[in-house]
Image (tube, grey):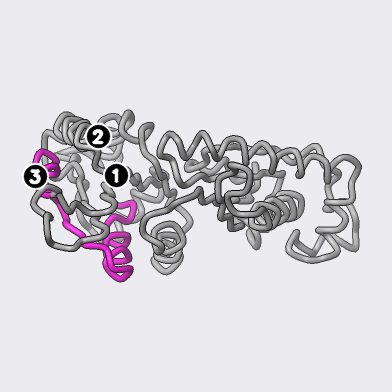
Amino acid sequence: MNQPHEVLILTGMSGAGRSTVAHALEDLGWYVVDNLPASLLPSLVSQTDGAKILAMAVVVDVRSGGFFDELNDALQELTANKTPHRLLFLDSTDQALVQRFESTRRPHPLQGGDRIVDGIARERTKLEDLRSRADVVIDTTNLNVHQLEKRVGEIFAAGEIHGVRVNVLSFGYKYGIPVDADLLLDCRFIPNPHWVPTLRHLTGLTEEVSEHVLSSPGVGAFVDSYVALLQLMARGYLQEGKKYVTLAVGCTGGKHRSVAIAEAIAARLNALPDEVNGEVEIEAYARHRDVGRE
């Protein structure tokens, strides 16, 4: 059977950007089906025989009713049929979701006669287990439409991934831990450039701050050790079918230390030889959530 090379199930919180992601995937050449009843997912995949569809994305959400039980059964059937598939979950904070629903003046699909926050709470409870099983989680709280489209392109533009992609995301603890983090790295043990008057106004993207952070005692060995650890983990991730990982690197404000360390880790991961001595190919890119917020 000529099934798609990959099937992506797109789901998540209502208002978190499913339509934007679906349109972005279409622009990348994916065949996208919106609001499909979950029970029809295996049948849809099987009917693509001969259609020469390389990548298919299916949007499934609470609008289809009987959501979790049907989708759980459908995912089990895809696994039994050995159909390559991934689950993408879009999330956002309750505050951001409320603001988006209020701006569009549309009710939440599970709101009924109650408040928007009640509908959001019901949906979170319904999707809690599904979110924990997702292969990729994207937090859209601080992303505008164009930034979300860019993130989708970074993850899915290449279609089927043969290695592991690592999103190295710097952040500030004072603004909260990213909800889509798979791994968390705390850089607050490193001397803070904030207390150096000539560096305070700069960020970890500058050469001055980067040198100050990376030359601190033990930091170079720390970065090397963590990169080596990620290499070991990448093999396990790939064996388990997880091809996209978000490493959140945090410091107090997300301006100096975490930015410099995130850049250093991403650069060293990208400098690794591809698939040498049994190692997994790793593609990394650094993003900085909180630069400019101070």
Q: Find residue 79 and name its label.
A: 2
Going from N to C along the chain, the mark reached first, 1 or 2, is 2
Question: Is label 3 in a helix, a strand or a loop?
Answer: helix
Picture mark count: 3
Q: Are marks 3 and 2 in contact (CB under 8 Å)?
A: no
x%, y% of residue 11?
A: 27, 46
Going from N to C along the chain, the mark reached first, 1 or 3, is 3
Q: Are marks 1 and 2 in contact (CB under 8 Å)?
A: yes
Number of residues whose C-alpha sits closer than 10 Å to that of mark 3, classed few (under 14), some (14–19) or many (20 or more): few
x%, y% of residue 88?
A: 34, 46
Q: Which residue is at a point 37% across and 55% down the rendered structure image?
A: 160
- Distance from the alpha carbon under mark 1 to that under mark 3: 14 Å
Provide the residue designation for mark 1.
85
> Quick check: is 250 in the magenta stretch?
no
Task: Tell whether 254 sits left or right of 59.
Answer: right
Q: Which residue is at a point 56% across and 55% down the rendered structure image?
A: 283
Q: Which residues are magenta?
A: 15-44
Q: Residue furthest front?
A: 277
Identify the amino acid type marked 3: Ser
Number of residues whose C-alpha sits closer than 10 Å to that of mark 2, classed few (under 14), some (14–19) or many (20 or more): few
Going from N to C along the chain, the mark reached first, 3 or 2, is 3
User: Does 7 appear above or below 226?
Assistant: below
Q: Find residue 43 and name its label.
A: 3
x%, y% of residue 294?
A: 68, 58
> Quick check: is 31 in the magenta stretch?
yes
Identify the amino acid type marked 2: Thr
Q: Are marks 1 and 3 in contact (CB under 8 Å)?
A: no
